[in-house]
Amino acid sequence: MGSKFLRAAVTSIAVLGITLTACSSDDTSSTGSATLKEVTDRGVLNCGVKDSQPGFGFMNPDGVMEGNDVEYCKAIAAAVLGDASKVKFVPASAKARFDILAAKEIDVLIRTTTWTASRDINLKTTFAHTTFYDGQGMMVKAASSFAQTSDLNGATICVTTGTTTEQNLEDFFADRGLSYTALAVENDAESQAAFLQDRCDGWTGDKSNLAGQRSAYPAEGGGPAALRILPDTLSKEPLGPVTREDDPLWSQIVDWVVLGTILAEEFGVDSTNVAAQASSPKNKDVARLLCAGAEPTEFKLGISCDFMQNVIAQVGNFGEIYARTIEPIGLAREGSLNASWKNGGLIYAPPMR
């Protein structure tokens, strides 16, 4: 009996040891980022973007991608790979964007994508900090008599499928006992064509998108002056980068790249002075942001401690990025939700310490 008991005990301990070893191995592997390894092994960041929205993601006449979302793709590449040019821009339609993210065809989605509960929870995604606080609006012909969105009762409205815009539009009209006819389109080009052909009385979408599309409205239709964005806002649309929720460390990397650009602006660190600030930080906040000074702070993200030096030097801080990409389409920061918290806006980042 004693011998059998001893053998059983030894076997149980051995099995337990194997189990503990397996758990320990799993725990160790889970502390890293599979996406980060894939990106570094590949040497290129695959970033899902829009390619038709001036100010956020579009291809200019020279075939170069530009826009606020594009700049954040570059910022992540600068942080992870040390080179902002190491990005493959993958066109992501409104309908397919979450599918290609889930299928790992892209490493991060930065495509004017609204943070909602259903997307955050049901699609198993993680939204990084908001890069632009937007809201849905309505654009009409400047010569029309429409003064506010409710004036379009009974009108035909162009609306892009696969977006939160569809539900917001339905809710807005239903709540007011109004009616409309939706002309469903796949993209902005189809909306523009419908407007040029007078098949739509209204064109709805995020106000940032409407401003971008108005800025590029063709001369044959009267150019930007032929369109007018109505003053009312139909919804809240916080836009920002999206990652898969199964890789929390990668999500943290993406999030802290965005937050780092916000903090850089707050601390007065930009692309023109980042080298000098890294050499001689003016205070501990800057030293921590840039991983500089006598005792640099390591945040264990799995990337170079001084990643924000590369981001700021190669892409800029939040304000620089905004001024370069969004202000040219007529969306000023001053007085908007996208102003710094110090100036009455919502752009705010937790401390990096």
Image: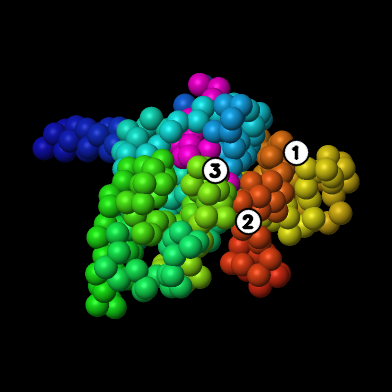
**In the rendered structure, which amino acid carries the disc numbered 2?**
Gly
Identify the residue at image location x=50%, y=42%: 220
**Furthest residue in direction left, as rendered:** 1
**Chain-order first, disc 2 or disc 1:** 1
Of circles 3 and 1, the one toward us is: 3
Camera-nearest residue between 213 and 136: 213
Q: Secondary structure at mark 2?
A: loop
**In the rendered structure, which amino acid carries the disc numbered 1?**
Ala
Circle 2 sits on which residue?
Answer: 330
Segment tinted magenta in the rendering: 42-58
Report the Cα–Cα distance between label 2 and label 1.
26 Å
Camera-nearest residue between 331 and 277: 331
Report the Cα–Cα distance between label 2 and label 3.
18 Å
Q: Dot 1, crowdedness within 10 Å: few (<14), some or many (≥20)?
A: some
Q: Is residue 250 left or right of residue 202?
A: right
**Furthest residue in direction top, as rendered:** 42
Circle 3 sits on which residue?
Answer: 219
Note whether 255 is above or below 313 in the view shown. Answer: below
Residue 119 placement (x, y as % from top left): 34, 54
| Dot label at residue 313 | 1
- Do the residues bearing badges 2 and 1 touch, measured as CB atoms within 8 Å? no
Q: Quadrant of residue 305?
A: top right
Q: Dot 3, crowdedness within 10 Å: few (<14), some or many (≥20)?
A: few
